[in-house]
Image (cartoon, rainbow, N blue to C red):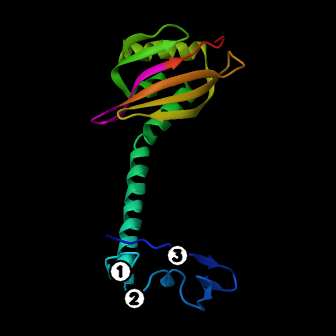
Amino acid sequence: MILFRPWIVSCTVKSMKFNGKPIGSRMFGMHLFRKTPYPSSDSPQGGSGHRTIRSVRFVQLVWVLTMLSVFCVCQAWSQDYVDELQTIRKAVAEGDARQLMAVSTESIELALFAASQQYTRSQATLVLKQFFKQNTPTSFELIDSTRSNRSLFVEGRMRTSNYEIPLRTYFRLKKSADGWKLREFLIESPDR
């Protein structure tokens, strides 16, 4: 049985105290653990013996390394689609249908002010070229994103020369063997 004992530590700018007693210039943290054994099993508090500074430091080190590795994995997991998002953002802002379809799957679902329809990559390029010709984008910004296991849902706002208000834009990326690919692209009608 491992016995955890609460230690009360107070620290001020001028002095540090441990359980109300000044500890002088000792390094903060070194005084938190006893060099002597915890109470024996025959004491009223129970206990199983010798927990030293080294064993506690080892536990602290393991905990810190675990947290760092979790942080690094989470960072890598959350950053693996940034290039695709930047490509999409740039392509929509410039009205470049060819560049936008370069990061799409072979078939893509498009909804441009209307009901969605399934297109091949080359058909979708022609449809988007026509749309961008009629509604020339002046800017595009990414607003929000939500990630599930193998999909990324993104919301954006596109400003065009035809409309005063920004058009809400939604798209979904699907994870494949060779990275993230655009699977759905939707632009809402401005009167919604």
Q: Is residue 79 visible?
A: no
Give the class, few, some or many, for how many residues have Cα within 10 Å of label 1's Cα (few <14, many ≥20): some
- Up-down: is 186 above or below 176? above
Q: Position of residue 107 (x, y in %)?
A: 34, 18
Residue occupied by mark 1: 51
Mark 3 lies on a secondary structure that is loop
Residue occupied by mark 2: 36
Residue 7: which numbered mark, if any?
A: 3
Q: Position of residue 20 (x, y in %)?
A: 62, 84
Q: Is residue 140 visible?
A: yes
Q: Residue at x 43, y 51 (%)?
A: 75
Q: Earlier in the sequence, mark 1 or mark 3?
A: 3
> Alpha-carbon distance for marks 1 and 2?
8 Å
Q: Position of residue 117 (x, y in %)?
A: 42, 9
* In the displayed structure image, the side of residue 186 where residue 60 appears, left or right: left
The magenta stretch spans which residues?
Answer: 175-185
